[in-house]
Image (tube, rainbow, N blue to C red):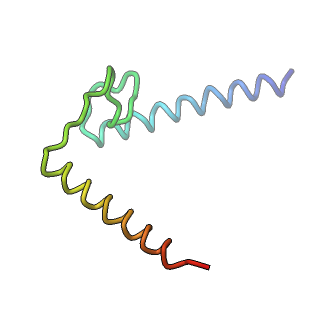
Amino acid sequence: MDILAALRQEETQLQRQLSGIQSAIAALDGRTNTRGFRPKAYRPGPRQKRTLSAAARAKISQAAKARWAKVRAEKGKKVK
């Protein structure tokens, strides 16, 4: 039983240390509310859809077509 009590005490101590470290990180990031620590990248709620401009879609399409053309050209060269 002494081992379990010691493990619980150690767990409590580690949780306090973790809370202190999270508070320190939050302070370095410039956040004042440290309750319920969340990483900076955390965004609650649904994600917004990202839209690409027509020019960006065209550029991506051309790059994909060029990659596939290269694959097809190499495949054609490997004739037995």
Q: Position of residue 58 (x, y in %)?
A: 19, 52
Q: Position of residue 71 (x, y in %)?
A: 44, 68
Work out whether residue 21 or residue 57 is closer to the camera in this orientation and state it: 57
Outermost front residue: 80
Q: Residue at x 37, y 40 (%)?
A: 25
Outermost right residue: 1
Q: Quadrant of the N terminus?
A: top right
Q: Is residue 39 left or right of residue 12?
A: left
Work out whether residue 27 or residue 53 is closer to the camera in this orientation and state it: 53
Q: Position of residue 55 (x, y in %)?
A: 13, 51
Q: Is residue 65 above or below residue 47?
A: below
Work out whether residue 17 or residue 69 is closer to the camera in this orientation and state it: 69
Q: Is residue 76 above or below residue 51?
A: below
Q: Residue at x 26, y 54 (%)?
A: 61
Q: Position of residue 35 (x, y in %)?
A: 37, 22
Work out whether residue 46 or residue 11 is closer to the camera in this orientation and state it: 46
Q: Quadrant of residue 62?
A: bottom left
Q: Residue at x 25, y 54 (%)?
A: 60
Q: Quadrant of the C terminus?
A: bottom right
Q: Is residue 32 left or right of residue 77?
A: left
Count the labels in the image.
Answer: 0
Q: Is residue 16 left or right of residue 71?
A: right
Q: Residue at x 56, y 29 (%)?
A: 15
Q: Quadrant of residue 7?
A: top right
